[in-house]
Amino acid sequence: MPEEIVGHCWNCGQGLTKLDYGRESTCLNCDKPTHCCRNCRHFAPGRPNECMEPLVERVVEKTRANFCEFFEPAMRAGGPAASATDPERLRGAAEDLFK
């Protein structure tokens, strides 16, 4: 029985299971680290330390594996295409509020 997909790779969008998020695990498709800030649901560019958790220790390299205790897999579909369109979609939604 296959494992349930709980998130997606920040780089290529490959579906990841709970077992794919080990400290030194990498994406089977693109070989990028999976337990990193870019794959975390708390990752928030523009916020202090680029994280929604106020007590988190600073991590400089957001695409490298780390030991963050607050890490939780992001449920959004990842990949370059998704990350490029999300800010544009959000900006459009915000502008629609003021029409």
Image (cartoon, rainbow, N blue to C red):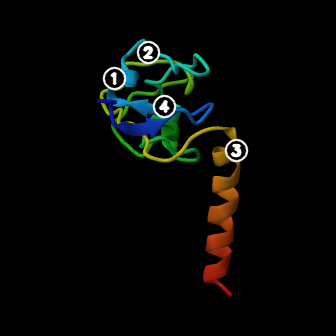
Relative to 52, is 55 above or below?
above
Please name the amino acid that badge 1 sits on: Leu
Label 1: few (<14), some (14–19) or many (≥20) C-alpha neighbours in 10 Å? few
Q: Nearer the viewer, mark 1 or mark 2?
A: 1
Label 3: few (<14), some (14–19) or many (≥20) C-alpha neighbours in 10 Å? few
Which image quadrant for residue 2? top left
Q: Nearer the viewer, residue 14 or 96?
A: 14
Q: Which residue in the protein does label 4 denote?
A: 37
Please name the amino acid that badge 4 sits on: Cys
Residue 19's label in the rendered image is 1
Secondary structure, mark 4, is helix
Residue 25's label in the rendered image is 2
Relative to 3, is 29 above or below?
above
Left or right of 83 in this view: 34 = left
Q: Residue furthest front?
A: 1
Residue 96's label in the rendered image is none
